Image (cartoon, grey):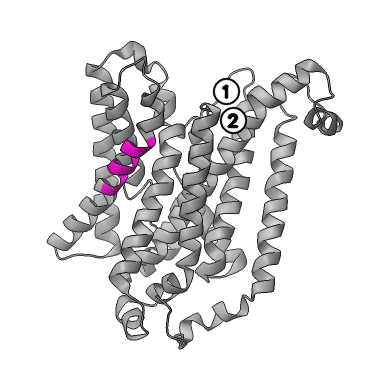
Amino acid sequence: MTPDRSVPPSLDASRRHTAARALRVTLSLAAAACAAGALATTIGSSHVGLSDLPAVLLGRGPSEARAIFADVRLPRVLLAAIVGAALASAGGALQSVLRNPLADPYILGLSGGAGLGAILWSTIAPATSDLGPALRPFFAFAGAVAAVFGLLALSRARGRKNAATMLLMGAVLNATCIALILFVVTVADVGRYQGVMYWLVGSLSPPSGSLLAAIYVCVSAGVIGLTLLGPHLNLLSAGEETAAQLGSPVARVRLLAILAACLVTAAAVSVSGLIGFVGLMVPHLARLWFGPDNRLLVPASALLGALILIVADTLARVLLAPTQIPVGVITAIAGGPCFLWLFAVRGEEGGAS
């Protein structure tokens, strides 16, 4: 799967991103995300000072501060980081694969499909079984895969595989999945899903440590896979015919990229619910600041997504404290105007692709 050395003129700018620049950008974003995460662990109704963090990390601080840090805030910051990274990297990859600047896991229905798969498994799984939470990401993955390939099949069947058609079908698919989730919740034991409304709009309640570790493994594998596909995603961005002429195995690259996007989306949705706009906004911000080269865009989107969702979740915790706002509400408030701007400015470009 080594691409031809020839690169279309439209991708000449990507050559400016040397390995040194990629490393510098990655380290800078990682440092910013870590700093935001450290600061977020000190913000909340109970005081944990920033100066207390070194002692808390070494297990020497006040017991109350250690408990708040280790049991509440650190798991939540870690969850926000991995969910933000997952949704942003998936959005960036989907925008390149589908050549659609408005594509993201939420708009295309991947999040809705993953959520439906997770809810169906939660319904049929024994309430007391440990396998319930553990297997939920797998059913979420199956739901996301079914959604995205159903969307591609419908687009091809209509012979209108363009941006506007796919966006419309994706929006309908996502709405249908949400309706089915509500139907399942209605007919199932409501007592088991008291938090489902929070989950539907995105909520970061940390799962068990083992499940959080499994989510980290899935998302890390997916982001690394999408980064390795970066050179081929660059060629796909120039068009399928051009990519094929330059030696890229188009069908295989598209399949691997979509499966990786489904994997990271499902992992995120299975623990955080449906968080919109992160997969749409963040890749555009990363592309604006760091350029279109997917070798850098994918990891930069992941790190920037982690940073932004950490900030959004911190705002969700403190704006109306002690009441916690679902983080999906914060991303929607910020993402709505961003989406309208993108649709107005780049809608014609997307429709032409």
Residue 316 numbered mark, or none:
2
Looking at the picture, how far across and down is residue 310, in whole percent? 62, 39
The quarter holding residue 65 reads top right
Furthest residue toward top: 191
Residue at 23 percent across and 24 percent down: it is 183
Looking at the picture, how far across and down is residue 12, in whole percent? 53, 83
Q: Is residue 85 left or right of residue 103?
A: right
Instruction: Mark yes or no: residue 338 visible.
Output: no
Which one is nearer the viewer's eye here, 338 or 243? 243
Indicate whether 107 appears above or below 295.
Answer: above
Contact flag, marks 2 and 1 (Cβ < 8 Å):
yes
For the stretch drawn in magenta, the main secondary structure is helix
Residue at 37 percent across and 65 percent down: it is 97
The quarter holding residue 199 reads top left
Instruction: Mark yes or no: residue 166 visible.
Output: yes
Query: Which region is colored magenta?
Result: 137-145
Q: Is residue 40 left or right of residue 177?
A: right
The quarter holding residue 244 reads bottom left
Other-residue count near label 1 (Cα within 10 Å), few / some / many at <14 / 14–19 / ≥20: some
Lower position in the chain sequence, tag 2 or tag 1 = 2
* Element assignment for label 1: loop
The type of residue carrying mark 2 is Ala
Quadrant location, the C terminus:
bottom left
Q: Is residue 59 left or right of residue 350?
A: right
Q: Disc 2 and disc 1: Cα gap in Å?
A: 6 Å
Residue at 56 percent across and 59 percent down: it is 299
Looking at the picture, how far across and down is residue 294, in whole percent? 50, 68
The type of residue carrying mark 1 is Gln
Residue 324 numbered mark, or none:
1
Indicate whether 336 appears above or below 19.
Answer: above
Looking at the picture, how far across and down is residue 41, in whole percent? 71, 31
